[in-house]
Image (cartoon, rainbow, N blue to C red):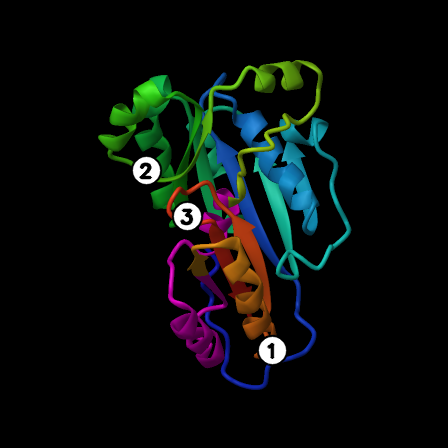
Amino acid sequence: MLTKPTGIGAINDEFEPETCRIAFVGEAGVGKTTIAALVAARLTERTRVNIAGEAAKLVDDCDADTGDGLDMEWVVADCPPGVDAIDARPERLDAVFVVATVESLERVETYERRATRYDVDCFLVLNRFRESARDRLQTFDGPVLAEYVYDNEAIPSAIDEDRVPDLPEWTVEAILIEALQPERQDAECALETLKRGHRSIVNVEVEERTDADPLVDSFESAGFSAAYFECNCRCHDGHVLARR
């Protein structure tokens, strides 16, 4: 989570690029590279991204900014299997995402403890999810669930063909939201938070997609960068994130 406070003062028309570094970790065979590639591919549609690890075989780095990425750069690390991967330069990580299946949930706590040792935010991404496992997920005591990805026969087929799976009805942008700013605020409080420099990034839920554009405009009119991010929640359509 990027929460570095910024000094109160004049807001520049030009935003300094900020880098968000996220790592995907987990046991062998849980689909970690698939999740990392899905996230990296979505980011390349928004902004500049550098990809490390096996996911780099599926997604190329991107040096272009579409103007829809909060003027940020990203580093996506698809780490080797095992908890020791977190030990590699943890000071350069903003968030760790533990990719697991229902069968490997008992190992997630080990990753959470290691991330906590370095004071790095840790989230869960549950892969190959089935509705029959929802009760198990609800009783799970561990990192906050950033996202789950349903078991889908299109995913292994795509990986076998060395390409990123196409999931047109499912987004992975909740992972980006959690990495940047998981705490929600209402629009008025969020704007005031940015103006006072209490946070560098704020997050506002929007019930309908049509509510997002006016909110983005209001942040930009106040001198901030803002963008809409989708999520898979049933109670609202997405989030507007804004930053100084």
Q: Which residue is mark 2?
A: 113
Above or below residue 153? Residue 70 is below
Could you tell which of marks 2 and 1 lies nearer the N-terminus? 2
Q: Is residue 74 left or right of residue 122?
A: right
Could you tell which of marks 3 and 1 lies nearer the N-terminus? 3
Is residue 94 visible in the rendered structure shown here?
Answer: no
Q: Are marks 3 and 2 in contact (CB under 8 Å)?
A: no
Q: Is residue 66 left or right of residue 5?
A: right
Could you tell which of marks 3 and 2 lies nearer the N-terminus? 2
Name the outermost residue toward the left: 139
Within-10-Å neighbours for mark 1: few <14, some 14–19, many 20+: few
| Dot label at residue 120 | 3
Q: Disc 2 versus disc 1: distance between alpha carbons?
A: 42 Å
What residue do we see at 70% from left, 23% from top?
163
The magenta stretch is 174-203
Q: Disc 3 versus disc 1: distance between alpha carbons?
A: 33 Å
| Dot label at residue 38 | none
Residue 141 at x, y percent in the picture:
24, 34
Does the stretch in magenta take in 180?
Answer: yes
Q: Disc 3 versus disc 2: distance between alpha carbons?
A: 10 Å
Residue type (three-letter) at the residue carrying disc 1: Ser
| Dot label at residue 221 | 1
Camera-side residue of 234 and 38: 234
